[in-house]
Amino acid sequence: MTHRAKYISPLCFAALSLSALAHTQDQDQTQTVRIDKANASLTSVIIDEIIAYDERSPRAADLALSVSALSGDDLTVIAAVHPAEALNSLAGVNIQRGSGQEHLTAIRSPVLTGGAGAGSFLYLEDGVPLRAAGFANVNGLFEGLSETAAGLEVVKGPGPVLYGSNAVHGLVNIINPQAAGPNQFQLLGSDDGLAALRLSAGLGPLRAVLSITHDNGFREASGFDQQKLGLRYEGGWGAWDLTAQLSVQNLNQETAGFVQGEAAFENDDLAFGNAFPEAFRDSSTYRAYARFDRDFSTGRLSITPYARSVDLRFLRHFVPGQALEENSHRSAGVLTSYYGDDFNIGFDAEYTQGELFEFQENPTRFSFIQGLHFDYEIESLVLAGYAEKDVQFTDRILFNIGVRGEYTRYNYDNRADSGQFGRFIRLDDRKDDYFTLTPKASLTFKASDNLNVYLRAARSSRAPQTSDLYSLQQNQVPGEADVETLDSLEAGVKARLGAIRFDAAAFTQWKDNFFFRNANGFNVSNGQTRHKGIEVGVFVPINDYIAFRGSGTLAEHTYDFTEIVGSAANNIISGGRIDTAPDTLGHFTAIITPNERLSAEFEWRHVGSYFTNPGNTNRYDGHDLFILRGEAVVSNSLSIFGRIDNLFNINYADRADFAFGNERFFPGRSRTLFFGLKGEF
């Protein structure tokens, strides 16, 4: 054992086993959601115990879309320090955690990096994007108020017509708690130096939420401090219903980098060390929106103006040279929707001013030159319109068709000398325009009150990220990056047999103009990929005391083009597997509630093996993790809880890849005890 190994006494283990944390709420909440078209947001709700597409009308149509959700009770039980700890329990989702709050996301996709990772997933809070479309961030989930959320929801595959750029492979929506409700608190700590406070308090039409987290980090120089605040108002404004939200986030993080070498994550000296103690990430974000809703004779109108401010400063420790990057943007926009029983139309607009500065103080390494890399400003304008219509063929068959058109304009202003400097290309001032059209169509068959079957065809797309267009590198042609599109076909079933809940979906997807950074660190602007798979979710209550919940994913992600770069490890061959794309993902939880005051969960999470380079010459074998949770109710307003992560203390990697000729890993946390108090006041 190393000096960082964890020891948990038999007494502690027994106490947790008797009192684990569980979700004894209605278990099918994790499988039931609605999309609230008027709010342009998703909202947790149980509708007839089967996922339904709710138009906030007298009729709730069955949802021809793959959506998974975690309720507020689920999130309280999980007590996640990082959103991945909650979201990775959902089929088709694979979020790899880096250091601190950093992460990379996969939803029906490989784990994507850089502009591809930033632009392929849309992160929302109450249906409002956390970031401007062209200025997204692969780590963007840490900016939302997930610690105090009333729910998290994931749409898998192309999003509905309400959402445009970045909703390519899927979207994640963070739902803030409503003003009405109990006052709640949670205190959380760990045996390796984490301490967190979470509060949610309401008074009449107002609610405030607060999250304060300090984490020493399990690796050297890898701790972080993060504060989040949310203020909410719900009431009226003349004839309008009004909901207003202000969200604030601040992060100061010391970042640990990759460990390098064959199976380096199994070496405790490397895994708990940090070769990049100088690395850091600082972030501050401010967001506000006000949603106005009003009924008219033919429908209901919703108008949501919003504004945001984002500042980010970090060391690019993951590439040679380790340049400092500072980027920021300020946005103002509006989301509108007018909807009735069987239609929805709307218009969205957003204006953004952003900037990026990148400078390398370290000596030149390879083509990563010392000195200025980039210094530019960008103005962005996005205009979008959408329409959607339901056609009820029979009592059992519903057809839905919709389309979204989106126009994006970038105005780029270079504040430095133009030309090529090492591997970096600085462009002359320019303007770029893009237009995307994304149709959607679905057919739902209600075979019985307990069985729904659906078919869906949908296209998603995104304009290039500003970093794709203007942080150019050698071998890239200005203006070469084009609109990325993904076409998807999906078939699914949602069923109930007594108390058993079951849903499954099969999908196939084709992506064109895939813009990504290859293993040599150079940009590829016209990649093509293919994705297909099956996802299953199930909830099975055995009796009043025991229940099982699980999800599984079997998928294949392949390249559909060839790129020969001279190295077998880095060559892309059509039909080859995309790196960092496990074939299998699994999650299984046994829930035990011996009485009303004690509960326990035993959870297994599986990540299958995957290739770590495009040439498919290196592989990570995958891992299986086990988690034990427990809760004991002390009184009507107070509970004690705890959990043990990585119960059997295995060595594993949260992330594995192969780049710049090295195997690289983010080692996973060793066995860790979390404990705390929660209750109402």
Image (spheres, rainbow, N blue to C red):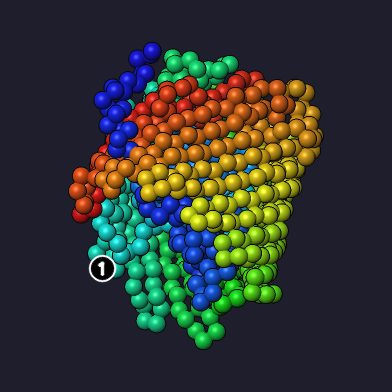
Q: Position of residue 203 (x, y in %)?
A: 24, 64
- Name the side, left or right, on which 602 lies relative to 459: left
At label 1, the amino acid type is: Gly
- The residue shown at (50%, 56%) is 498
Look at the numbered disc 1 and give the secondary structure of its residue.
loop
- The residue shown at (36%, 37%) is 629
- Going by the picture, which residue comes out furthest to the bottom? 297
- Can residue 121 be seen? yes
Q: Does residue 295 lie above or below 251 as drawn?
A: below
Picture mark count: 1
- The residue shown at (60%, 24%) is 621
Q: Residues within 10 Å of mark 1 (few under 14, many from 20)?
A: few
The residue lying toward the viewer, choosing from 484 and 541, is: 541
Q: Quadrant of residue 395?
A: bottom right
The quarter of the rendered structure image containing the C terminus is bottom left
The residue lying toward the viewer, choosing from 7 and 452, is: 452
- Can residue 40 be seen? no
- The residue shown at (55%, 84%) is 298
Q: Position of residue 171 (x, y in %)?
A: 55, 52
Q: Does residue 212 lie above or below 240 as drawn?
A: above
The quarter of the rendered structure image containing the N terminus is top left
Q: Position of residue 336 (x, y in %)?
A: 53, 71
Q: Quadrant of residue 63?
A: bottom right
Q: Which residue is mark 1?
A: 204
Q: Position of residue 52 (x, y in %)?
A: 54, 63
- Name the side, left or right, on which 168 lies relative to 270: right
- Going by the picture, which residue comes out furthest to the top? 1
